[in-house]
Image (spheres, grey):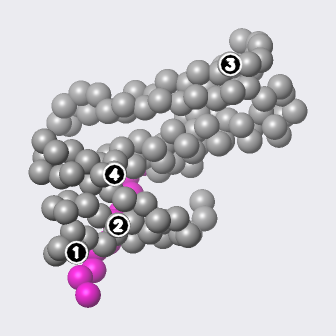
Amino acid sequence: MSNSQATARIGSVDANYLVHLQAGSHALLGDESAGLGGTDQGPPPFAFVLSGLVSCTAITLKMYMQKKQWPVADVEVTAVFQGKDEARFIRREVRLSGVELGEAERERLAQICERTPVTLFLKGASRIETTFL
């Protein structure tokens, strides 16, 4: 995993919960839904978590197919939060289309999904250190 950095800024004059994000060289907006007092001008925080998971999954699967010199399929990955409170979990679905992969190849890709960097990070306990400046 590379050293990644993200910064969030929310000003006193910004629309309620609209947050300006900087992730590396990319500028993004985050927000909450109108139902939570936001203006829905960007994804809410947990959508960014899911986006990180599905993008990492899709990228890792394509890299693996290329490395193995398998026919490269179109990859679509969807993730949703399920459950409540301590019983919450993420349900991830992977769709491959455009090529025919054998059962052994599909099974191997399913194993690879469980070993992507973001999957491993989310499954493991990570320490977060906070400092107020």
130 falls in the magenta region = yes
State the CA–CA distance, disc 2 to disc 4: 9 Å
Q: Amino acid at mark 3?
A: Ser
Q: CA distance from mark 1 to mark 3?
A: 44 Å
Q: CA distance from mark 3 to mark 2?
A: 36 Å
Evaluate if marks 2 and 1 touch, with contact meaning CB atoms under 8 Å apart: yes
3D distance between C-alphas at marks 3 and 4: 30 Å
State which quadrant residue 17 falls in. Answer: bottom left
Give the residue number, with chain letter if any, for mark 4: 42
Give the mark nearest the N terminus, 2 or 1. 1
Q: Quadrant of residue 68?
A: top right
Query: Which of the two discs, 2 and 4, labels the residue nearer the N terminus?
Result: 2
Secondary structure of residue under mark 1: loop
Which label's residue is closer to the chain start, 1 or 4? 1
Give the class, few, some or many, for how many residues have Cα within 10 Å of label 3's Cα (few <14, many ≥20): few
- Determine which of the numbered discs, if any, sits on residue 11 in the image: 1
Q: Nearer the viewer, mark 3 or mark 2?
A: 2
Of the two numbered discs 3 and 2 on the same chain, state the one appearing first in sequence: 2
Q: Position of residue 45 (x, y in %)?
A: 31, 51
Point out the stretch of residues depicted in magenta. 124-133
Q: Amino acid at mark 2?
A: His
Residue occupying image coordinates x 21% and y 51%: 39
The spot of residue 64 in percent (x, y) is 75, 37
Q: Main secondary structure of the magenta part?
A: loop
- Graded by Cα atoms within 10 Å as few (under 14), some (14 to 19) or many (20 or more), the crowding at tag 4 reads some
